[in-house]
Image (cartoon, rainbow, N blue to C red):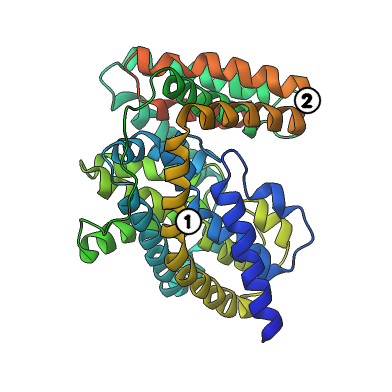
Amino acid sequence: MFELLLQMIKGVAFGTLTGLTPGVHVNSLSRLSFPTPTLFVMGLVHTFLDSIPSALFGVPDSDDTVPSLLPSHRIVLQGRFGELVRLSVTASTIALILAVLVYPIYSLVAPLYRFEVGLTFIVFLSLFLILSQKNKIGALLIFLLSGFLGYCAFNIPIRDPFYPLFTGLFALPLLIESYLNPPKEVRVEDSKLSVGILRVLKFSALGTFFGSLASLLPTLTAGQASLLGSKLTKDDLDYLTIIYSTNTAAYAFSLANLALTGKTRNGVMVAIGEVSTSELLYLYLLGISAALLVMIFAPRIAILLGKVAFRFYRKAIMAIILFLFALGYLYNGLPGVSLMLSAMLLGFLAPRWRVFRVTYMGVLMLPVLVESVI
């Protein structure tokens, strides 16, 4: 029992480290030889906290947080950072609990998956992403250009193409814009949720459904699945609730999918390798315990991080930019840095063409479609 508790604490510690460090994904640590409970809790806690650096600096750790960047940034600039953190951990906790509760239904659906179903979803999402925007031609061009960049990246010999692609497309343009036009004054203080728990529960349930889809379809990520929520709500907090809950639910369901079908949907599940259905209950209970722990300490750590960040805002942003390039070189050498710079130049186009930044998700969608046709 004590050993299990120790493994949970280690998972919380490492998940907090990856979740709060801009540009560092939990997959970077999943290669270490941790026991299954530590790996699962680490990845879970990461989904609770990765919204914090995204909100403060606009730096995504992966595609899962990309859709939330601008809405969360707006809320931070309104002085509601504390509320944003509480929304993230609350929505994620609810999504985890709901994922556990609907597991019996999920266990019947997961074995029925076929690749054709995933491909159909990608076609639908691609059309939805382009046709739902006012500048449809601009959106199509951004989708095609990012898709071409993604196709090239996946066919050159680098170890991790995802890092330079997402860092260049999403993080660096926002960081540079923030450095050139820093906010004059931002209040960073703790605050309670301005929305009722029933409203959070409603949109967390919706995000849990999207998360279940993302865990089933390998061509569909949590970030892509949550795009559907953009048309179901007009309020930033409701939309972010969907984003945060989708991210956590997709991760929670991926463990069930691994146990039921043996399929891995993220780097942590690859590291875990194998898990039985009889182990799911105690792992989920361990995850819920970790979630309750995070709900207690996360707001305090986040507020402290936010105050330091905005006190030295431009210096912090410059340090992050240098850190991201250093990681890019560490992961993939000069080819990775070159790819990151190419993605960064493309990343400046969407806002100038009045196209949603999330259209850059074509970097994943188009290569899948092309590979399927070829």
How many C-alpha atoms fall within 10 Å of the one at disc 2: few (<14), some, or many (≥20)?
some
Q: Which residue is mark 1?
A: 301
CA gap, disc 2 to disc 1?
A: 33 Å
How many C-alpha atoms fall within 10 Å of the one at disc 1: few (<14), some, or many (≥20)?
few
Residue 230 drawn above or below residue 146: below
Q: Nearer the viewer, residue 277 or 323?
A: 323
Q: Nearer the viewer, residue 191 or 52?
A: 191
Give the quadrant of residue 72.
Answer: top left
- Give left or right: position of 239 versus 18: left
Residue 71 drawn above or below residue 256: above
For the C terminus, the quadrant is: top right
Residue lying at the far front in this picture: please name it: 311
Q: Nearer the viewer, residue 220 or 270?
A: 270
Name the residue located 56 percent from the left edge and 46 percent from the top edge.
115
Q: At which x and y percent is residue 283? A: 59, 74
Name the residue located 43 percent from the left edge and 59 percent from the top edge.
300
Q: At which x and y percent is residue 334? A: 76, 20
Q: At which x and y percent is residue 36? A: 70, 68
Give the quadrant of residue 14.
Answer: bottom right
Q: Nearer the viewer, residue 189 or 109?
A: 189
For the N terminus, the quadrant is: bottom right
SS type, badge 1: helix
Q: Residue 121, can we see it?
A: no
- Give left or right: position of 328 versus 199: right
Kind of residue indicated by mark 2 = Gly
Kind of residue indicated by mark 1 = Ile
Residue lying at the far bottom in this picture: please name it: 1
SS type, badge 2: helix
Name the residue located 62 percent from the left edge and 17 percent from the top edge.
341
Sequence-first tag of 2 and 1: 1
Label ID, residue 333 = 2
Give the quadrant of residue 277.
Answer: bottom right
